[in-house]
Amino acid sequence: MASLSSFRLAVLVAALLVVGSCATEVTFKVGEGSSGKSLELVTNVAISEVEIKEKGGKDWVALKESSTNTWSLKSEAALKGPFSVRFLVKNGGYRVVDDVIPESFTAGSEYKSGINV
């Protein structure tokens, strides 16, 4: 009986490892159109909404999806990082990553969220 329980436990652990390894870490690549007054983020996974909040800010600002997995914000004032990002994953649930885009972001840079979906 103990060997059957050990076998079941081993199968369960293996299944959890397989499921866990299927997750993808969300990354944000700063698009080529980004500057001091505009920010373009390209994600590597399907996302329904993206918002950013400037360091010390109180409000989240929505980015507009300009093409698949590309989100843009144009501002009249200079953007002040670092930026926290809040996003809605298409399979459900909001996620927040604090200070993921640094103050000195540059076009072409990619930042990892540390969140797997």
Image (spheres, grey):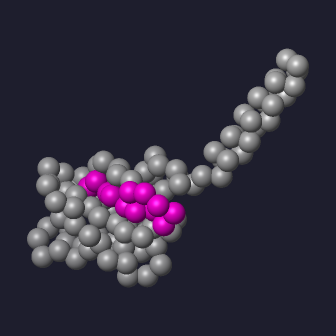
Magenta residues, start to end? 83-94
In-image side of 60 versus 20 (left or right): left
Residue at the (26%, 70%) spot, across then down: 62
Figure disc tally: 0
Along the line of sight, which residue is nearer the eye, 47 or 12?
12
Q: Quadrant of residue 105?
A: bottom left
Farthest residue, direction top: 2
Residue 39 is situated, as x and y percent measured from the top left of the image, at 29, 70
Observer able to see residue 35: no
Along the line of sight, which residue is nearer the eye, 76 or 45?
45
In-image side of 68 versus 54 (left or right): right
In-image side of 24 versus 107 (left or right): right
Residue at the (74%, 36%) spot, across then down: 12
Q: In which quarter of the image is residue 30?
A: bottom left
In-image side of 73 versus 58 (left or right): right
Residue at the (53%, 54%) spot, across then down: 117
As drawn, 52 above or below 18: below
Q: Is the magenta stretch mostly helix, strand or loop?
A: strand
Residue 51 is situated, as x and y percent measured from the top left of the image, at 29, 64
Residue 15 is situated, as x and y percent measured from the top left of the image, at 74, 42
Along the line of sight, which residue is nearer the eye, 4 or 34?
4
Residue at the (57%, 54%) spot, across then down: 24
Residue 84 covered by magenta stretch: yes
Farthest residue, direction front: 1
Residue 67 is situated, as x and y percent measured from the top left of the image, at 43, 82
Farthest residue, direction bottom: 66
Observer able to see residue 95: yes
